[in-house]
Amino acid sequence: MLTTNNLCRKLFLPQAGSVEIAFGLNRSALRRRHVARYAARFELRLTEIDSGEAHELLDETLALGSDFRQRRTVSLEPFALRHVELCVATEALGPAATRALDGPAVGTADRLPEQATEPFAYWSNPIVTTADTPIAVSTGAETSIEGLTDEEIEVRMEHLRALGYVD
């Protein structure tokens, strides 16, 4: 999961590319906050860096009564071989829309601090794939760092940081 609900990344898109995303609501956090009438709007936007032209790729609203987890694959083919900025954004909707998605709510004095700050909406890390991307079958071996040099481990960590998996 992303550590923030509003994030942009600059990318160079491959040919025949698509972005795989997942987003949803943390139902238990919503229930603990007593905000059953809450909803969150999830947006995926792409801006072409050269032209500045913006495109809305996804705009969906989820509420507690809806299917609280969603997965989508969005085609990026119209933007192939271009430099873009891909952004995810989340907006709180409901009777107390001043409540932050990942922070304390207005008027949370009657709730425990950890309940007031637990995020109730989330995004997975967007993954850009191509039609040629093979489907990986995990054997467990690829997660082992046994036998790697310190330099190889550092290179793996740099790759994970660049992809947003590690801070």
Image: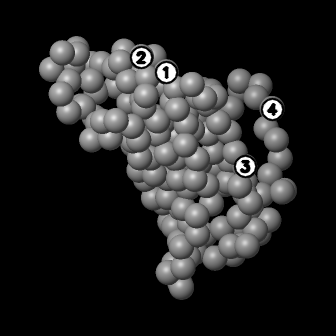
Residue 26: x and y in percent read 48, 25
Q: Which residue is located at x 51 percent, y 67 percent?
A: 85
Viewer-proximal residue, 81 or 25? 25
Residue 151: x and y in percent read 50, 45
Q: Which residue is mark 3?
A: 73
Q: Which residue is mark 1?
A: 27
Report how far apart the C-alphas of labels 4 and 3 lie in the structure.
20 Å
Give the foreground label among 3 and 1. Answer: 1
Q: For the view shown, which residue lies furthest in the bottom direction?
A: 51
Give the foreground label among 1 and 4. Answer: 1
Secondary structure of the residue carrying numbered label 1: helix
Q: For the view shown, which residue lies furthest in the front direction?
A: 95
User: Compared to 131, does 104 lie above or below?
Assistant: above
Picture disc at residue 137: 4
Q: Which residue is mark 2?
A: 31
Give neighbour class at mark 4: few <14, some 14-19, many 20+ (Cα, 10 Å): few
Give neighbour class at mark 1: few <14, some 14-19, many 20+ (Cα, 10 Å): some
Dot 4 or dot 3: first in sequence order is: 3
Secondary structure of the residue carrying numbered label 4: loop
Report how far apart the C-alphas of labels 3 and 1 lie in the structure.
23 Å
Dot 1 or dot 4: first in sequence order is: 1
Residue 155 visible at all: no
